[in-house]
């Protein structure tokens, strides 16, 4: 029996959670107990099982020491390699400061619905701030399975598309993270969060149905300094600037709005950045300009919603006709055409379902392309030539090496898996990257 205990070693809270991590099965009747060395408090004996949790009080600032005891089915003590737990209560900030940016988790409004941002903190809210939200799994996840439930964090207030906000990170609950059981669709995901005045975001998700507790493995940080090496990412800043500029040009053909010129001016510094000479500060400033331009685009979209929806639909249908229809099965082509007509009626009626139809059309496009071996190969080549898109350099290099060998041996099926794994650690890459790392939790 391999036994360990999961807990956050440093916290400003007066309460902390200790969770049992058990590999294999404990004998029926086995128990454990947690005592506080400093105060003499004891939890009493509790049933020993994987995922069992206990709340302890941190009575003093600094180190709080606890001792763990384990007993077999007849009450005999079981020796542990490590039976001491030290949890440090850190100083909490007294003076509240206002949050400079809004931070939210991407969730589905309902099963099969549109992704929206469920905000943990709004710009101007007092920090530090903590709270709890209960989400639901949109799909089932079995222990050991290759999938994951994804809690995606974004900074910003752009409603559509969410990907125009700044990505902070993803907390993944993977099938490989728990040893037994299934998280069924509809299961509660209890998300406790804390945003410190430093910008650090601590997140812990408890899944009662499997008795598991999951941490991000790192503190997220709600500003660029904590997320990207902006000297290395200068190429990405230029790419994001050019992509936004193309979008402005596309809209400008149909819509006349002075905010488009303002957005274009903001992008000048981003697209003229020289990646070989760019300093971190300049890259950060340029990325801020890209985000400001996208906020202006979001305002233009609200003011000219019908025209911009038509641009989006026409572009998607043209792309299907020119590049994808030839690879589609007759039933797929028919389904796409019918859905495009439904989306057109949605524009004409000015109803709120259009974006959902558009996402479905994008999904159909991607599904057909993903089946094509040449598309998988080209996407892998593009990824390998864009190392600036990946924060985890070690994992990127590892996957790039594996993928190159698979491409040489013409094992495209395994290469697909590598491309999907690369997409999960990608920072940028545009909206099409959502196909791999979709939000699959529902607002509670």
Image (cartoon, rainbow, N blue to C red):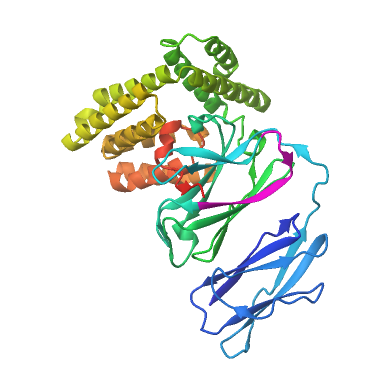
Q: Is residue 275 visible?
A: no
Residue 31 in percent (x, y) is at: 60, 81
- Taking the magenta stretch, the answer to whether it contains residue 103 is no
Considering every residue shown, the one lying at the far front of the view is 349
Q: Is residue 408 above or below residue 305?
A: below
- So how many labels did they put on this image? 0
* Residue range highlighted in magenta: 123-135
Viewer-proximal residue, 236 or 299? Answer: 299
Q: Residue at x 53, y 77 (%)?
A: 1
- Taking the magenta stretch, the answer to whether it contains residue 134 is yes
Q: Is residue 14 above or below residue 98?
A: below
Residue 178 in percent (x, y) is at: 49, 63
Viewer-proximal residue, 336 or 394? Answer: 336
Viewer-proximal residue, 427 or 314? Answer: 314
In-image side of 65 versus 271 (left or right)? right
Considering every residue shown, the one lying at the far left of the view is 330
Q: Residue at x 47, y 51 (%)?
A: 149
């Amino acid at each position: 029996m391999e036994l360990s205990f999961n807990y956050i070693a440093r916290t400003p809270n007066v309460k902390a959670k200790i969770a049992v991590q058990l590999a294999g099965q404990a004998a029926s009747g086995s128990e454990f107990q947690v005592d506080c060395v400093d105060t003499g408090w004891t939890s009493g004996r509790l049933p020993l099982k994987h995922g069992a949790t206990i709340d302890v009080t941190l009575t003093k600032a600094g180190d709080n020491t606890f001792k763990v005891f384990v007993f077999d089915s007849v009450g005999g003590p079981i020796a542990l390699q490590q039976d001491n737990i030290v949890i440090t209560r850190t100083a909490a900030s007294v003076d509240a400061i206002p949050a400079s940016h809004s931070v939210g988790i991407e969730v589905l409004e309902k099963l099969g619905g549109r992704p929206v941002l469920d905000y943990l903190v709004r710009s101007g809210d007092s920090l530090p701030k903590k709270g709890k939200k209960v989400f639901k799994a949109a799909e089932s996840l079995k222990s050991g399975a290759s999938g994951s439930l994804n809690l995606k964090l974004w900074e910003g207030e752009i409603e559509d598309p969410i990907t125009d906000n700044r990505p902070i990170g993803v907390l993944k609950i993977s099938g490989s993270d728990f040893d037994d059981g299934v998280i069924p669709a509809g299961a509660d995901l209890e998300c406790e969060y804390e945003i410190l005045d430093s910008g650090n975001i601590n997140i812990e998700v408890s899944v009662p149905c499997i008795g598991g507790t999951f941490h991000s493995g790192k503190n997220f940080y709600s500003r660029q300094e904590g997320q990207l090496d902006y000297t290395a990412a200068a190429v990405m800043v230029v790419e994001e600037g050019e992509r936004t500029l193309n979008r402005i040009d596309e809209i400008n053909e149909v819509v006349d709005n002075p905010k488009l010129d303002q957005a274009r001016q903001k992008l000048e510094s981003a697209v003229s950045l020289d990646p070989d000479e760019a300093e971190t500060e300049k890259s950060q400033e340029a990325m801020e300009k890209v985000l400001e331009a996208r906020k202006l685009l979001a305002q233009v979209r609200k003011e000219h919603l019908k025209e911009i929806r038509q641009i989006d639909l026409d572009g998607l249908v043209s792309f299907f006709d020119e590049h994808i229809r030839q690879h589609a099965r007759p039933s797929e082509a028919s389904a796409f055409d019918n859905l495009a007509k439904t989306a057109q009626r949605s524009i004409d009626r000015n109803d709120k379902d259009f974006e959902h139809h558009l996402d479905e059309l994008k999904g159909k496009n991607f599904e057909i392309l993903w089946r094509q071996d040449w598309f998988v190969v080209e996407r892998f080549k593009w990824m390998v030539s864009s190392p600036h898109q990946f924060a985890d350099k070690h994992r990127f290099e590892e996957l790039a090496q594996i993928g190159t060998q698979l491409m040489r041996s013409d094992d495209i099926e395994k290469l697909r898996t590598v491309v999907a794994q690369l997409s999960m650690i990608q920072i940028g890459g545009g909206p099409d990257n959502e196909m791999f790392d979709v939000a699959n939790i529902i607002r509670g």
